[in-house]
Image (cartoon, helix red, strand yellow):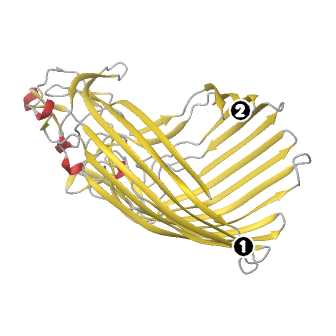
Protein backbone atom coordinates (compact mmCIF):
# COMPACT_ATOMS: atom_id res chain seq x y z
CA UNK A 1 0.00 0.00 0.00
CA UNK A 2 1.19 3.49 -0.87
CA UNK A 3 -0.46 6.81 -0.26
CA UNK A 4 0.09 10.53 -0.21
CA UNK A 5 -1.85 13.62 0.77
CA UNK A 6 -1.22 17.29 0.07
CA UNK A 7 -2.43 20.81 0.66
CA UNK A 8 -1.52 23.77 -1.54
CA UNK A 9 -2.24 27.46 -1.17
CA UNK A 10 -1.91 29.79 -4.16
CA UNK A 11 -2.36 33.56 -4.34
CA UNK A 12 -1.94 35.68 -7.47
CA UNK A 13 -2.59 39.33 -8.26
CA UNK A 14 -2.31 40.66 -11.79
CA UNK A 15 -2.38 44.33 -12.81
CA UNK A 16 -2.16 45.25 -16.50
CA UNK A 17 -2.59 48.40 -18.57
CA UNK A 18 -4.54 47.87 -21.80
CA UNK A 19 -6.46 49.66 -24.49
CA UNK A 20 -10.20 50.08 -23.99
CA UNK A 21 -13.48 50.14 -25.88
CA UNK A 22 -14.69 53.09 -23.80
CA UNK A 23 -15.39 56.18 -25.88
CA UNK A 24 -17.30 59.46 -25.75
CA UNK A 25 -21.00 59.36 -26.61
CA UNK A 26 -23.99 61.69 -26.54
CA UNK A 27 -22.00 64.43 -28.19
CA UNK A 28 -19.10 63.84 -25.82
CA UNK A 29 -21.05 64.51 -22.62
CA UNK A 30 -20.92 60.93 -21.27
CA UNK A 31 -18.86 57.77 -21.61
CA UNK A 32 -19.98 54.61 -23.38
CA UNK A 33 -18.61 51.21 -24.31
CA UNK A 34 -19.37 48.91 -27.23
CA UNK A 35 -22.34 50.03 -29.32
CA UNK A 36 -22.87 53.25 -27.35
CA UNK A 37 -23.83 51.40 -24.17
CA UNK A 38 -23.49 53.70 -21.13
CA UNK A 39 -20.95 52.92 -18.41
CA UNK A 40 -22.92 52.69 -15.20
CA UNK A 41 -21.75 54.20 -11.95
CA UNK A 42 -21.51 52.32 -8.65
CA UNK A 43 -24.31 49.79 -8.04
CA UNK A 44 -25.65 50.33 -11.55
CA UNK A 45 -26.35 54.02 -11.02
CA UNK A 46 -26.54 56.80 -13.63
CA UNK A 47 -24.18 56.81 -16.57
CA UNK A 48 -20.75 58.32 -16.05
CA UNK A 49 -20.25 61.90 -17.34
CA UNK A 50 -17.26 62.65 -19.54
CA UNK A 51 -14.90 64.94 -17.64
CA UNK A 52 -11.68 63.73 -19.30
CA UNK A 53 -11.42 66.31 -22.06
CA UNK A 54 -9.19 65.08 -24.88
CA UNK A 55 -7.20 62.56 -22.80
CA UNK A 56 -6.37 59.28 -24.51
CA UNK A 57 -8.29 56.40 -22.98
CA UNK A 58 -7.13 53.03 -21.68
CA UNK A 59 -7.98 50.78 -18.78
CA UNK A 60 -6.24 49.18 -15.82
CA UNK A 61 -7.33 45.54 -15.60
CA UNK A 62 -6.89 43.91 -12.21
CA UNK A 63 -7.62 40.38 -11.15
CA UNK A 64 -6.88 38.30 -8.10
CA UNK A 65 -7.11 34.55 -7.58
CA UNK A 66 -6.93 32.84 -4.20
CA UNK A 67 -6.95 29.04 -4.32
CA UNK A 68 -6.81 26.40 -1.60
CA UNK A 69 -6.51 22.85 -2.89
CA UNK A 70 -6.03 19.49 -1.28
CA UNK A 71 -6.18 15.84 -2.21
CA UNK A 72 -4.31 12.59 -2.28
CA UNK A 73 -3.78 9.17 -3.77
CA UNK A 74 -4.17 5.68 -2.31
CA UNK A 75 -2.64 2.81 -4.25
CA UNK A 76 -2.30 -0.96 -3.87
CA UNK A 77 0.29 -3.06 -5.70
CA UNK A 78 0.73 -6.80 -5.93
CA UNK A 79 3.60 -8.74 -7.51
CA UNK A 80 2.49 -12.34 -6.97
CA UNK A 81 3.15 -14.66 -9.89
CA UNK A 82 0.25 -15.48 -12.20
CA UNK A 83 0.26 -18.90 -13.90
CA UNK A 84 3.94 -19.11 -13.06
CA UNK A 85 4.77 -15.81 -14.75
CA UNK A 86 5.84 -12.55 -13.17
CA UNK A 87 2.87 -10.20 -12.82
CA UNK A 88 2.52 -6.69 -11.40
CA UNK A 89 -0.90 -5.19 -10.58
CA UNK A 90 -1.46 -1.55 -9.61
CA UNK A 91 -4.85 -0.22 -8.52
CA UNK A 92 -5.71 3.05 -6.89
CA UNK A 93 -7.87 6.09 -6.47
CA UNK A 94 -7.04 9.81 -6.52
CA UNK A 95 -9.05 12.83 -5.40
CA UNK A 96 -8.13 16.48 -6.04
CA UNK A 97 -10.37 19.26 -4.70
CA UNK A 98 -9.95 23.01 -5.00
CA UNK A 99 -11.76 26.21 -4.01
CA UNK A 100 -10.93 29.41 -5.87
CA UNK A 101 -12.13 32.95 -5.19
CA UNK A 102 -11.69 35.07 -8.28
CA UNK A 103 -12.20 38.84 -8.49
CA UNK A 104 -11.63 41.18 -11.41
CA UNK A 105 -12.21 44.84 -12.25
CA UNK A 106 -11.42 47.24 -15.07
CA UNK A 107 -10.68 50.85 -14.13
CA UNK A 108 -10.93 53.49 -16.82
CA UNK A 109 -7.57 55.17 -17.30
CA UNK A 110 -5.75 57.80 -19.28
CA UNK A 111 -2.66 57.01 -21.34
CA UNK A 112 0.49 59.08 -21.19
CA UNK A 113 1.47 59.65 -24.86
CA UNK A 114 5.17 59.72 -23.93
CA UNK A 115 5.45 56.27 -22.35
CA UNK A 116 2.00 54.63 -22.83
CA UNK A 117 1.65 54.29 -19.04
CA UNK A 118 -2.00 53.95 -17.98
CA UNK A 119 -3.14 55.97 -14.95
CA UNK A 120 -6.45 55.05 -13.32
CA UNK A 121 -9.24 57.63 -13.04
CA UNK A 122 -11.23 55.97 -10.25
CA UNK A 123 -14.05 55.13 -12.70
CA UNK A 124 -14.67 51.36 -12.84
CA UNK A 125 -16.18 50.08 -16.07
CA UNK A 126 -19.52 48.41 -15.46
CA UNK A 127 -21.54 47.32 -18.47
CA UNK A 128 -22.45 43.62 -18.50
CA UNK A 129 -24.05 43.86 -21.95
CA UNK A 130 -20.63 44.80 -23.34
CA UNK A 131 -18.98 41.88 -21.57
CA UNK A 132 -17.08 44.02 -19.09
CA UNK A 133 -18.21 44.35 -15.48
CA UNK A 134 -16.72 43.66 -12.05
CA UNK A 135 -16.51 39.94 -11.31
CA UNK A 136 -16.58 38.14 -7.97
CA UNK A 137 -16.73 34.42 -8.49
CA UNK A 138 -16.19 31.27 -6.49
CA UNK A 139 -15.12 28.20 -8.42
CA UNK A 140 -15.17 24.73 -6.87
CA UNK A 141 -13.67 21.78 -8.66
CA UNK A 142 -13.28 18.12 -7.72
CA UNK A 143 -11.44 15.59 -9.87
CA UNK A 144 -11.77 11.90 -8.98
CA UNK A 145 -9.91 9.07 -10.68
CA UNK A 146 -9.99 5.29 -10.25
CA UNK A 147 -7.36 3.26 -12.10
CA UNK A 148 -6.13 -0.30 -12.59
CA UNK A 149 -3.17 -1.59 -14.63
CA UNK A 150 -1.61 -5.01 -14.93
CA UNK A 151 1.80 -5.87 -16.38
CA UNK A 152 2.18 -9.54 -17.28
CA UNK A 153 5.48 -11.11 -18.36
CA UNK A 154 4.53 -13.44 -21.20
CA UNK A 155 8.20 -14.48 -21.47
CA UNK A 156 11.38 -13.22 -19.86
CA UNK A 157 11.67 -10.84 -22.84
CA UNK A 158 8.08 -9.89 -23.67
CA UNK A 159 5.73 -8.06 -21.26
CA UNK A 160 2.19 -6.78 -21.83
CA UNK A 161 0.50 -3.94 -19.91
CA UNK A 162 -3.25 -3.29 -19.96
CA UNK A 163 -5.61 -1.27 -17.85
CA UNK A 164 -7.77 1.78 -17.62
CA UNK A 165 -8.66 4.87 -15.64
CA UNK A 166 -12.10 6.33 -14.95
CA UNK A 167 -12.14 10.11 -14.48
CA UNK A 168 -14.99 12.15 -13.04
CA UNK A 169 -14.79 15.96 -12.91
CA UNK A 170 -17.14 18.33 -11.09
CA UNK A 171 -16.74 22.06 -11.80
CA UNK A 172 -19.14 24.55 -10.22
CA UNK A 173 -19.16 28.33 -10.72
CA UNK A 174 -21.07 30.62 -8.35
CA UNK A 175 -21.50 34.38 -8.70
CA UNK A 176 -20.79 36.27 -5.46
CA UNK A 177 -22.03 39.71 -6.57
CA UNK A 178 -25.71 38.79 -6.65
CA UNK A 179 -26.06 40.58 -9.99
CA UNK A 180 -24.98 37.92 -12.48
CA UNK A 181 -26.94 34.72 -11.86
CA UNK A 182 -26.20 33.59 -15.42
CA UNK A 183 -22.62 33.00 -14.37
CA UNK A 184 -23.75 30.19 -12.08
CA UNK A 185 -23.21 26.76 -13.57
CA UNK A 186 -22.63 23.14 -12.63
CA UNK A 187 -20.57 21.05 -15.03
CA UNK A 188 -19.90 17.32 -14.97
CA UNK A 189 -17.46 15.36 -17.14
CA UNK A 190 -16.67 11.67 -17.05
CA UNK A 191 -14.84 9.10 -19.14
CA UNK A 192 -13.16 5.68 -18.99
CA UNK A 193 -9.73 5.79 -20.64
CA UNK A 194 -8.10 2.48 -21.69
CA UNK A 195 -4.39 1.78 -22.06
CA UNK A 196 -2.57 -1.18 -23.63
CA UNK A 197 1.06 -1.67 -24.54
CA UNK A 198 4.01 -3.97 -24.57
CA UNK A 199 7.80 -4.14 -24.29
CA UNK A 200 10.21 -6.58 -25.89
CA UNK A 201 13.87 -7.00 -24.94
CA UNK A 202 15.70 -7.48 -28.22
CA UNK A 203 18.96 -7.79 -26.29
CA UNK A 204 19.72 -7.28 -22.58
CA UNK A 205 20.57 -3.64 -23.37
CA UNK A 206 17.98 -2.89 -26.09
CA UNK A 207 14.20 -2.72 -25.60
CA UNK A 208 11.39 -2.03 -28.05
CA UNK A 209 8.10 -0.60 -26.75
CA UNK A 210 4.72 0.28 -28.24
CA UNK A 211 1.36 1.26 -26.84
CA UNK A 212 -2.03 2.87 -27.23
CA UNK A 213 -3.74 5.08 -24.65
CA UNK A 214 -6.62 7.48 -24.30
CA UNK A 215 -7.00 10.50 -22.02
CA UNK A 216 -9.54 13.22 -21.37
CA UNK A 217 -9.28 16.81 -20.16
CA UNK A 218 -12.22 18.68 -18.72
CA UNK A 219 -12.46 22.37 -19.60
CA UNK A 220 -11.01 24.69 -16.98
CA UNK A 221 -13.25 27.17 -15.12
CA UNK A 222 -11.74 29.97 -17.25
CA UNK A 223 -12.56 28.14 -20.48
CA UNK A 224 -16.09 27.32 -19.31
CA UNK A 225 -16.65 30.92 -18.23
CA UNK A 226 -15.35 32.50 -21.42
CA UNK A 227 -16.82 30.68 -24.40
CA UNK A 228 -19.49 33.02 -25.77
CA UNK A 229 -18.50 34.96 -28.94
CA UNK A 230 -21.12 37.59 -28.08
CA UNK A 231 -19.57 38.19 -24.64
CA UNK A 232 -15.79 37.91 -24.97
CA UNK A 233 -13.39 38.15 -22.05
CA UNK A 234 -10.15 39.90 -21.30
CA UNK A 235 -8.18 36.67 -21.59
CA UNK A 236 -6.81 35.40 -18.24
CA UNK A 237 -8.80 38.08 -16.47
CA UNK A 238 -12.57 37.92 -16.71
CA UNK A 239 -15.30 35.30 -16.64
CA UNK A 240 -18.79 35.73 -18.03
CA UNK A 241 -21.79 33.45 -18.42
CA UNK A 242 -21.30 31.27 -21.47
CA UNK A 243 -22.44 28.09 -23.22
CA UNK A 244 -20.78 24.84 -22.11
CA UNK A 245 -17.74 23.31 -23.79
CA UNK A 246 -17.09 19.66 -24.53
CA UNK A 247 -14.22 17.87 -22.86
CA UNK A 248 -11.09 17.12 -24.90
CA UNK A 249 -10.42 13.42 -25.60
CA UNK A 250 -7.04 12.31 -26.94
CA UNK A 251 -6.00 9.05 -28.58
CA UNK A 252 -2.26 8.35 -28.53
CA UNK A 253 -0.16 5.74 -30.31
CA UNK A 254 3.54 5.61 -29.47
CA UNK A 255 6.46 3.31 -30.17
CA UNK A 256 10.21 3.41 -29.88
CA UNK A 257 13.47 1.98 -28.65
CA UNK A 258 15.48 2.56 -25.49
CA UNK A 259 18.75 1.11 -24.37
CA UNK A 260 21.91 1.35 -22.30
CA UNK A 261 25.61 0.82 -22.83
CA UNK A 262 28.19 0.28 -20.10
CA UNK A 263 27.96 -1.14 -16.60
CA UNK A 264 28.91 1.72 -14.27
CA UNK A 265 29.88 5.38 -14.24
CA UNK A 266 33.54 4.68 -13.50
CA UNK A 267 34.10 3.40 -17.03
CA UNK A 268 31.22 5.32 -18.60
CA UNK A 269 27.50 4.63 -18.85
CA UNK A 270 25.28 5.68 -21.74
CA UNK A 271 21.46 5.58 -21.80
CA UNK A 272 19.34 6.62 -24.78
CA UNK A 273 15.82 6.59 -26.17
CA UNK A 274 14.16 7.22 -29.51
CA UNK A 275 10.39 7.23 -29.93
CA UNK A 276 7.55 8.40 -32.13
CA UNK A 277 4.07 9.52 -31.06
CA UNK A 278 0.74 10.25 -32.76
CA UNK A 279 -1.99 11.99 -30.70
CA UNK A 280 -5.38 12.71 -32.22
CA UNK A 281 -7.58 14.93 -30.04
CA UNK A 282 -11.36 15.25 -30.36
CA UNK A 283 -13.11 18.52 -29.48
CA UNK A 284 -9.85 20.34 -28.80
CA UNK A 285 -10.26 23.72 -27.09
CA UNK A 286 -8.65 26.78 -28.68
CA UNK A 287 -8.53 30.47 -27.86
CA UNK A 288 -10.17 32.68 -30.50
CA UNK A 289 -9.83 36.44 -30.89
CA UNK A 290 -13.10 38.28 -30.46
CA UNK A 291 -14.62 39.87 -33.57
CA UNK A 292 -15.61 42.78 -31.32
CA UNK A 293 -13.64 44.77 -28.77
CA UNK A 294 -9.93 45.38 -28.41
CA UNK A 295 -7.19 42.90 -29.25
CA UNK A 296 -6.95 41.54 -25.70
CA UNK A 297 -10.52 40.24 -25.82
CA UNK A 298 -11.28 36.68 -26.86
CA UNK A 299 -13.10 33.49 -26.00
CA UNK A 300 -12.64 29.70 -26.06
CA UNK A 301 -14.33 27.22 -28.36
CA UNK A 302 -14.16 23.58 -29.38
CA UNK A 303 -12.36 23.24 -32.71
CA UNK A 304 -13.02 19.66 -33.78
CA UNK A 305 -10.04 17.36 -34.26
CA UNK A 306 -6.38 18.30 -33.94
CA UNK A 307 -3.29 16.16 -34.46
CA UNK A 308 0.06 16.28 -32.70
CA UNK A 309 2.67 13.85 -33.96
CA UNK A 310 6.44 13.71 -33.90
CA UNK A 311 9.54 12.14 -32.43
CA UNK A 312 11.42 12.37 -29.14
CA UNK A 313 15.09 11.54 -28.67
CA UNK A 314 17.20 11.61 -25.52
CA UNK A 315 20.80 10.82 -24.65
CA UNK A 316 22.55 10.73 -21.26
CA UNK A 317 26.21 9.89 -20.60
CA UNK A 318 27.84 9.63 -17.18
CA UNK A 319 31.49 9.03 -16.47
CA UNK A 320 33.35 9.72 -13.24
CA UNK A 321 32.26 13.22 -12.13
CA UNK A 322 30.84 14.24 -15.51
CA UNK A 323 27.28 14.06 -16.79
CA UNK A 324 26.30 15.18 -20.29
CA UNK A 325 22.81 14.99 -21.77
CA UNK A 326 20.78 16.05 -24.80
CA UNK A 327 17.05 15.97 -25.60
CA UNK A 328 15.28 16.73 -28.87
CA UNK A 329 11.58 16.89 -29.71
CA UNK A 330 9.94 17.39 -33.09
CA UNK A 331 6.19 18.01 -33.07
CA UNK A 332 3.92 18.53 -36.03
CA UNK A 333 0.73 20.11 -34.65
CA UNK A 334 -2.09 20.53 -37.16
CA UNK A 335 -5.83 21.03 -37.41
CA UNK A 336 -7.77 18.03 -38.76
CA UNK A 337 -11.13 19.79 -38.98
CA UNK A 338 -12.17 22.83 -40.98
CA UNK A 339 -12.98 25.94 -38.94
CA UNK A 340 -14.11 29.45 -39.73
CA UNK A 341 -12.61 31.76 -37.10
CA UNK A 342 -12.99 35.51 -36.52
CA UNK A 343 -9.75 37.37 -37.24
CA UNK A 344 -10.29 41.14 -36.99
CA UNK A 345 -6.55 41.94 -36.82
CA UNK A 346 -5.12 39.30 -39.17
CA UNK A 347 -3.83 41.09 -42.31
CA UNK A 348 -4.64 38.01 -44.39
CA UNK A 349 -8.24 37.71 -43.21
CA UNK A 350 -11.21 37.76 -45.55
CA UNK A 351 -13.97 40.35 -45.30
CA UNK A 352 -17.61 39.36 -45.03
CA UNK A 353 -19.28 40.66 -48.24
CA UNK A 354 -22.40 41.50 -46.24
CA UNK A 355 -20.59 43.30 -43.40
CA UNK A 356 -17.31 45.16 -43.86
CA UNK A 357 -16.71 45.09 -40.10
CA UNK A 358 -16.53 41.29 -39.96
CA UNK A 359 -13.21 39.65 -40.89
CA UNK A 360 -12.52 35.93 -40.73
CA UNK A 361 -10.18 33.14 -41.80
CA UNK A 362 -11.00 29.68 -43.12
CA UNK A 363 -8.82 27.09 -41.41
CA UNK A 364 -8.48 23.87 -43.38
CA UNK A 365 -7.21 20.43 -42.33
CA UNK A 366 -3.42 20.42 -42.39
CA UNK A 367 -2.94 24.01 -41.23
CA UNK A 368 -0.49 24.22 -38.34
CA UNK A 369 -1.64 25.24 -34.87
CA UNK A 370 -0.03 28.57 -33.86
CA UNK A 371 2.18 28.98 -30.81
CA UNK A 372 3.70 25.47 -30.95
CA UNK A 373 7.37 25.37 -32.06
CA UNK A 374 8.13 22.38 -34.27
CA UNK A 375 11.64 21.91 -32.87
CA UNK A 376 12.95 21.93 -29.30
CA UNK A 377 16.48 20.98 -28.30
CA UNK A 378 18.22 21.07 -24.94
CA UNK A 379 21.76 19.97 -24.13
CA UNK A 380 23.82 20.38 -21.00
CA UNK A 381 26.79 19.26 -18.99
CA UNK A 382 27.40 19.03 -15.24
CA UNK A 383 30.63 18.53 -13.33
CA UNK A 384 30.94 17.47 -9.71
CA UNK A 385 33.95 19.55 -8.67
CA UNK A 386 33.85 18.08 -5.17
CA UNK A 387 31.44 15.78 -3.40
CA UNK A 388 29.50 18.88 -2.32
CA UNK A 389 30.02 21.35 -5.19
CA UNK A 390 28.40 20.96 -8.62
CA UNK A 391 28.60 23.30 -11.63
CA UNK A 392 26.88 23.08 -14.99
CA UNK A 393 25.69 24.75 -18.15
CA UNK A 394 22.91 24.13 -20.66
CA UNK A 395 21.65 25.52 -23.94
CA UNK A 396 17.98 25.70 -24.95
CA UNK A 397 17.09 25.97 -28.62
CA UNK A 398 13.47 26.63 -29.62
CA UNK A 399 12.38 26.62 -33.25
CA UNK A 400 10.17 29.10 -35.03
CA UNK A 401 6.39 29.15 -34.50
CA UNK A 402 3.33 30.71 -36.10
CA UNK A 403 1.85 33.80 -34.46
CA UNK A 404 -1.26 33.33 -32.32
CA UNK A 405 -4.14 34.12 -34.63
CA UNK A 406 -2.29 33.04 -37.78
CA UNK A 407 -4.13 29.71 -37.97
CA UNK A 408 -3.91 29.72 -41.78
CA UNK A 409 -0.09 30.11 -41.65
CA UNK A 410 0.27 33.07 -44.02
CA UNK A 411 2.41 35.58 -42.08
CA UNK A 412 6.06 35.35 -41.10
CA UNK A 413 6.85 33.13 -38.12
CA UNK A 414 8.23 34.13 -34.75
CA UNK A 415 12.00 33.53 -35.17
CA UNK A 416 13.84 30.64 -33.54
CA UNK A 417 16.16 31.38 -30.62
CA UNK A 418 18.86 29.86 -28.43
CA UNK A 419 19.66 30.70 -24.80
CA UNK A 420 22.65 29.61 -22.67
CA UNK A 421 22.29 29.21 -18.88
CA UNK A 422 24.72 28.47 -16.03
CA UNK A 423 24.02 26.91 -12.64
CA UNK A 424 25.87 25.81 -9.54
CA UNK A 425 25.03 24.35 -6.13
CA UNK A 426 26.87 23.54 -2.91
CA UNK A 427 25.71 21.18 -0.15
CA UNK A 428 26.44 22.71 3.23
CA UNK A 429 25.04 19.60 4.90
CA UNK A 430 23.30 16.55 3.42
CA UNK A 431 19.98 18.38 3.96
CA UNK A 432 20.88 22.03 3.19
CA UNK A 433 22.03 23.30 -0.18
CA UNK A 434 22.74 26.77 -1.58
CA UNK A 435 22.40 27.37 -5.31
CA UNK A 436 22.92 30.00 -7.98
CA UNK A 437 21.58 30.46 -11.51
CA UNK A 438 22.48 32.76 -14.39
CA UNK A 439 19.92 32.60 -17.17
CA UNK A 440 20.54 33.98 -20.66
CA UNK A 441 24.25 34.45 -19.99
CA UNK A 442 24.88 36.27 -23.27
CA UNK A 443 21.82 38.52 -22.87
CA UNK A 444 20.37 37.21 -26.11
CA UNK A 445 17.45 39.26 -27.47
CA UNK A 446 14.65 36.94 -28.60
CA UNK A 447 10.88 36.52 -28.71
CA UNK A 448 8.90 33.91 -26.77
CA UNK A 449 5.88 34.22 -29.04
CA UNK A 450 3.70 36.62 -30.94
CA UNK A 451 0.13 37.52 -31.84
CA UNK A 452 -1.89 39.93 -33.96
CA UNK A 453 -3.18 43.13 -32.39
CA UNK A 454 -5.35 45.97 -33.60
CA UNK A 455 -3.58 48.78 -35.42
CA UNK A 456 -6.15 51.51 -34.67
CA UNK A 457 -4.28 52.99 -31.73
CA UNK A 458 -5.83 54.66 -28.68
CA UNK A 459 -8.75 57.10 -28.98
CA UNK A 460 -9.18 60.27 -26.96
CA UNK A 461 -12.24 61.13 -24.90
CA UNK A 462 -13.14 64.02 -27.18
CA UNK A 463 -16.37 64.03 -29.15
CA UNK A 464 -14.37 63.69 -32.39
CA UNK A 465 -11.56 61.47 -31.08
CA UNK A 466 -8.09 61.71 -32.47
CA UNK A 467 -5.83 58.63 -32.34
CA UNK A 468 -2.45 57.94 -30.76
CA UNK A 469 0.09 55.13 -31.21
CA UNK A 470 -1.41 53.76 -34.39
CA UNK A 471 0.47 50.73 -35.69
CA UNK A 472 1.38 49.95 -39.28
CA UNK A 473 2.07 46.27 -38.55
CA UNK A 474 -0.46 44.18 -36.58
CA UNK A 475 2.21 41.69 -35.47
CA UNK A 476 3.24 42.02 -31.83
CA UNK A 477 5.88 39.97 -30.01
CA UNK A 478 6.56 38.94 -26.42
CA UNK A 479 10.22 39.61 -25.53
CA UNK A 480 12.17 36.89 -23.76
CA UNK A 481 13.78 37.40 -20.38
CA UNK A 482 17.16 39.20 -20.50
CA UNK A 483 20.19 38.18 -18.45
CA UNK A 484 19.02 37.29 -14.95
CA UNK A 485 20.81 35.98 -11.85
CA UNK A 486 19.29 34.13 -8.90
CA UNK A 487 20.57 32.71 -5.64
CA UNK A 488 18.81 30.73 -2.96
CA UNK A 489 18.83 27.94 -0.43
CA UNK A 490 17.07 24.56 -0.34
CA UNK A 491 16.42 22.47 2.73
CA UNK A 492 14.79 19.09 3.26
CA UNK A 493 14.09 17.22 6.46
Occupied quadrant, residue 127 = top left
Whether residue 191 sits left or right of residue 341 in the image: it is right
Q: Residue furthest bottom?
A: 83
Q: Position of residue 460 (x, y in %)?
A: 22, 26
Q: Residues within 10 Å of mark 1 (few under 14, many from 20)?
A: some
Which residue has dot 1 on it? Answer: 159
Residue at 66 percent across and 31 percent down: it is 491
Mark 2 or 1: the one toward you: 2
Q: Is residue 245 visible?
A: no
Residue contact between numbered discs 2 and 1, judged by CB atoms under 8 Å = no
Q: Position of residue 181 (x, y in %)?
A: 19, 48
Occupied quadrant, residue 102 = top left
**The N terminus appears in which quarter of the rendering?**
bottom right
Q: Position of residue 458 (x, y in %)?
A: 28, 30
Q: Position of residue 167 (x, y in %)?
A: 46, 63
Which residue has dot 2 on it? Answer: 431
Q: Is residue 96 above or below residue 89?
A: above
Occupied quadrant, residue 25 = top left
Residue at 43 percent across and 47 percent down: it is 404
**The C terminus appears in which quarter of the rendering?**
top right
**In the structure shown, which secondary structural element does the residue marked by tag 2 occupy?**
loop
Amino acid sequence: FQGNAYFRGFRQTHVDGNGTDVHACDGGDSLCIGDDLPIFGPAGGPSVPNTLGNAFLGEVDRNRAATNSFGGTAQLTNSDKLFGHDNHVVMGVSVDHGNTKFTATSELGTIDPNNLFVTGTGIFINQPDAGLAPVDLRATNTYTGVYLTDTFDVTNRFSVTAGGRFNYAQIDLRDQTGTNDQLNSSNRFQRLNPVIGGTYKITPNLTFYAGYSEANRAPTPLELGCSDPARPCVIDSFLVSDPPLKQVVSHTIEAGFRGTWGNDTRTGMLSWGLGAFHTLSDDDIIRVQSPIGTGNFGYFQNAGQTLRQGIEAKLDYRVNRWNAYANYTFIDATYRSANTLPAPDNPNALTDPNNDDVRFINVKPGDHIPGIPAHRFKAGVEYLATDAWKIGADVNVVGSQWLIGDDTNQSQKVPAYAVVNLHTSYKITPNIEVFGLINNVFNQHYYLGGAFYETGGFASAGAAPNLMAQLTDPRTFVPGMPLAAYAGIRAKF
